[in-house]
Amino acid sequence: METKTIKISSATYRDICEYAGELQKELGEPVSLDKALTSLFHKRKLGDLAGSWKMSEKDAEEMKRTIKKGWSTWKLKSV
């Protein structure tokens, strides 16, 4: 593996170390800063999941009804 040297601020270094610690707790194994940065760069976004949830038409209709019912309980306050 080829390595590179980069300059980052102390605050950024602290943030990366903090993230690496959180990732280590989650994975239950040692996490290098390289692995933490790789994880950050390849983290999936919600939009990446679009179309990947398989459900029946019945399930989809039930979800729509539930969401519609939930939204109907919201009221906007007039100013």
Image (cartoon, rainbow, N blue to C red):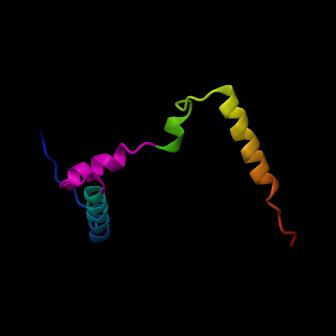
Question: x%, y% of residue 17?
Answer: 26, 64
* The one of 73 and 79 positioned closer to us in this rendering: 73
Q: Is residue 45 magenta?
A: no
Locate residue 45 relative to residue 79 in the image: left or right.
Answer: left
Q: Quadrant of residue 75?
A: bottom right
* The one of 71 and 3 positioned closer to us in this rendering: 71
Locate residue 53 relative to residue 2 in the image: left or right.
Answer: right
Q: Is residue 31 magenta?
A: yes
* The one of 3 and 51 positioned closer to us in this rendering: 51
Locate residue 19 relative to residue 78 in the image: left or right.
Answer: left
Outermost residue on the bottom side: it is 79
Which quarter of the rendering shows the N terminus?
top left
Question: x%, y% of residue 60?
Answer: 68, 33
Badge count: 0
Q: Quadrant of residue 43?
A: top left
Say which residue appears at 18% left-offset and 55% top-offset. Answer: 30
Q: Quadrant of residue 61?
A: top right
* The one of 13 and 62 positioned closer to us in this rendering: 62
Where are the magenta residues, as a range?
26-44
Which quarter of the rendering shows the C terminus?
bottom right
Question: x%, y% of residue 9?
Answer: 28, 67
Locate residue 9 relative to residue 77 in the image: left or right.
Answer: left
Question: x%, y% of residue 53?
Answer: 54, 32
Say which residue appears at 43% left-offset and 42% top-offset. Answer: 44
Say which residue appears at 79% left-offset and 59% top-offset. Answer: 74
